[in-house]
Amino acid sequence: VAYTRGKEGEGPFDKYSDSEEIIEECSSISRQQIVELVTSLRSQHVGDRENAELALLLARLYQALFPLVPNLLLSVRGKQKEKDSCSLAEVSVLVEKEAEDMFNVWTSSKLSKFSTSLFSLTSTAGSFLTSLPAWDKVIISETGDSGQEINSIISIPPSPSLPLITSLLSLASTIHRSHPSSFPQSLLSPTTINIFQMILSHYASLSSQALTQNFALQLLFDLHFTQTLLVSRDTKDQFSTTVSTLISSLETNIDPFDLSVFSPHLHSRVKKAAARCVSGLGCLVPADRVAIISSYKISTTQDSHNILCVEPQPCPRFQLLPLSTASLSKVSAKAALSSAHLQLPLLAGQAAVDAKKTAAGKTDKSPAHQTAASFFGSMPWFGTNS
């Protein structure tokens, strides 16, 4: 580096005459080696989709290549400025694209596991016990023909089906363990879209079958739940037609009167379930939906079977006690000791003398005592022995 950047000095030879050629050749060799490295790793490992963690490792390698090796940037750029360097731009685009491809390979393997787990939700009778959660019982009041109020109990699904929520939480946990904040910004949004498309595809196949009312009601809850969490403002128009068609197909399996009664309770529980799950599924929820879902109010009463009991009134914070400084404490302690050793005996003796003087003064100044003294003093015979 010093040789190629030195200044021409006095002498018969110009030792820096070929510095530009050296820099250009070094830049060319660096570009070739980076391209060969990317091509070699791609040919060896891109087809190995079973080893997804290796794809994630290669993606992070490409991400850290230029930030951790700044001299490589200088070698590729050569004597060109950073903004005008075409060779550096080409190599940077190549490395970034390869990193994004490796991230896509990793996410594709995780989405395949998500799809396998989601497909365990079927309409067979044997899967009901393993798929449907315990439902909430709601008491509703109706007025009969005779004018009397009739109370009836209905059951409403309070949470998504177990295969759906288990698959979503498992996928979100896997992404969280891989630090999604380091992923490219263009990666998580397509992942969320692919997840919702898989859910719509599977639920469309379920809706084409003959469904019981309870199972159709659970699927309807799942569809509203995923729509609330995963559909952003930008993708709303993309899925609006498909979602509306699927909702209409599921509602055909539910009695219209029951649907009109269940719908208000269903939508309120969808919001509660979304607000509970937004933290665990945070890496899959679009940014514009997080603030909206977090604003949903959740009832503080522990009336649901699948919510951990939380103390409604937490322990209040203990108030801090005012304490004096160390210097003031020492001074006050010394003053107290000196007062106890020197002043207390004097004060005790002085208090006894003062008490006698006060009592005598009070006796002398008493009007009754003065009258009695003058009366007995005028009689000399009083007090003498005859």
Image (cartoon, rainbow, N blue to C red):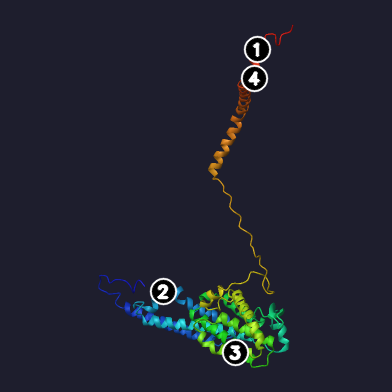
Whether pointer 2 and pointer 3 mark residues with C-beta atoms closer than 8 Å, the reply is no
Q: Which one is in front in this view, the residue at disc 2 or the one at disc 3?
A: 3
Whether pointer 3 and pointer 4 mark residues with C-beta atoms closer than 8 Å, the reply is no
Q: Position of residue 158 (x, y in %)?
A: 66, 78
Q: Which one is in front in this view, the residue at disc 4 or the one at disc 2?
A: 4
Amino acid type, mark 2: Asn
Give the crowd class for mark 3: few <14, some 14-19, many >=20 residues within 10 Å.
some
The tag earlier along the polypeptide, 2 or 1, is 2
Q: Tell which of 226 and 352 is nearer to you.
A: 352
Q: Position of residue 205 (x, y in %)?
A: 63, 92
- The quarter of the picture where residue 268 lies is bottom right
Q: Is any atom of residue 48 visible in this view?
A: no
Q: Position of residue 170 (x, y in %)?
A: 62, 79
Q: In the rendered image of this protein, does residue 342 appear above or below residue 329?
A: above
Q: Position of residue 148 (x, y in %)?
A: 72, 79
Q: In the rendered image of this protein, does residue 327 appear above or below residue 303?
A: above
Q: Which residue is mark 3?
A: 246
Name the quadrant of the C terminus.
top right
- The quarter of the picture where residue 90 lies is bottom left
Q: Secondary structure at mark 2?
A: helix
Give the crowd class for mark 2: few <14, some 14-19, many >=20 residues within 10 Å.
few
Q: Distance of mark 3 from mark 1, alpha carbons? A: 125 Å
Q: Which residue is mark 1?
A: 377
Q: Please tell me which residue is depicted at 65% across the width and 88% down the height of the picture.
A: 256
The tag earlier along the polypeptide, 2 or 3, is 2
Q: Distance of mark 2 from mark 1, alpha carbons? A: 124 Å
Q: Which residue is mark 2?
A: 71
Q: Secondary structure at mark 3?
A: helix
